Amino acid sequence: MATNPGAPDDSLSDAVTEAAGAPALEGHVGTFLWQGAELVYEEFGAGSSPVFVLVHGIGMGRVVFAELIDDLKRLGRVIAIDQPGYGDSPEPPRTPTMERTADMVAALLRERGVSQVTAIGHSMGTQVVAELAVRHPDLVDRLVLIAPTVDVSARHIAVQAARLVRDLWGESPKVVMLGGFEYLRAGPNLIRKMRAMMVHRPERSYPRITQRTLVLRGERDYVVPEPWARQAAALIPNARFDTLPDTSHQSMIRNAGPTTRRIMDFLRSERFEPAAGLAG
């Protein structure tokens, strides 16, 4: 398996995952090289439909989706990626923009022979999958944006860092262990990577999304204010907004169950009615 230079080896990663109480990832691991950058991906499940593509947030890696993967692989095929410079993916020669990362994910999907995917992004990953949906609409059937970043009033590294610290205060050891470990694996260029996240303007892409979209926000998410999450949903022509009760920004790491249930309901919905009445 390819690794991020300077990142801990796989045995340490496995030990941290086990200590945190997260399921072990046991899919098919591959690498994909595109225009000088490389990413690591892992596939689970089987079949041609549905196909779920999971894209993590800043400082993270595919391992934070472990519980969600465990749920979704029972429904279909799952492709979870480590963006270039995160998780097991090597550091790229230059930090890619959200648009460039989306193009790389699109190239991977075409290489794997899949389309009409349900693209699921968390935090910064929502910016990538939003661009994927806009720039490569033939590849995306539905979109799930979990804790979409970054709101217009907070595009400063110091503000985001302060919000993250507040969000993590009192979080479960599982979230702190997995999240902290993945941030260490992201390497010394994390500030540069955060700048790439900050300069992206998702509100310019949202109105161009044609796919059905589900926007999720944790009730206690200090990183993503509720007005911004609702604004994101309002800007997307065919979107709905839902709240994950009593959860933070890292909702699907601590307990993926509520997220899984909403995604399943989203996939079943034909009339695409609001999901405000769903149980937690």
Image: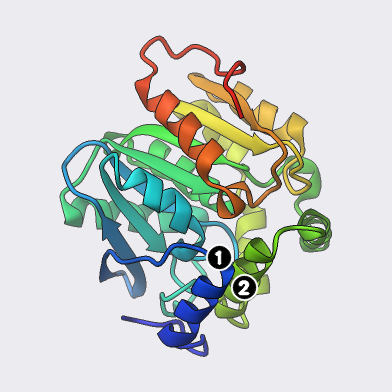
> x%, y% of residue 192?
64, 72
> x%, y% of residue 72?
36, 44
Q: Quadrant of residue 174?
A: bottom right
Residue at horizontal 51 percent and vertical 29 percent from the top: 214
Confirm whether residue 97 shows in the render: yes
Q: Is 85 situated above or below 134?
A: below
Q: Amino acid at mark 1?
A: Met
Label 1 Cα crowd, 10 Å radius (few <14 / some 14-19 / many 20+)? many
Q: Are marks 1 and 2 in contact (CB under 8 Å)?
A: yes
Q: Quadrant of residue 183?
A: bottom right
For the residues marked 1 and 2, what is the alpha-carbon distance in whole angstroms?
6 Å
- Numbered mark located on residue 183 in the image: 2
Q: Amino acid at mark 2?
A: Tyr
Dot 1 lies on which element?
A: loop
Q: Quadrant of the C terminus?
A: top right
Q: Is 177 situated above or below 136?
A: below
Q: Quadrant of the N terminus?
A: bottom left
Dot 2 lies on which element?
A: helix
Q: Is 236 situated above or below 35?
A: above
- Numbered mark located on residue 60 in the image: 1
Residue at horizontal 34 percent and vertical 70 percent from the top: 40
Residue at horizontal 65 percent and vertical 46 percent from the top: 149
> x%, y% of residue 219?
73, 36
Residue at horizontal 58 percent and vertical 35 percent from the top: 204
Q: Nearer the viewer, residue 37 or 229?
A: 229
Nearer the N terminus, badge 1 or badge 2? 1
> x%, y% of residue 14?
45, 78
* 128 displayed left or right of 169: left
Label 2 Cα crowd, 10 Å radius (few <14 / some 14-19 / many 20+)? some
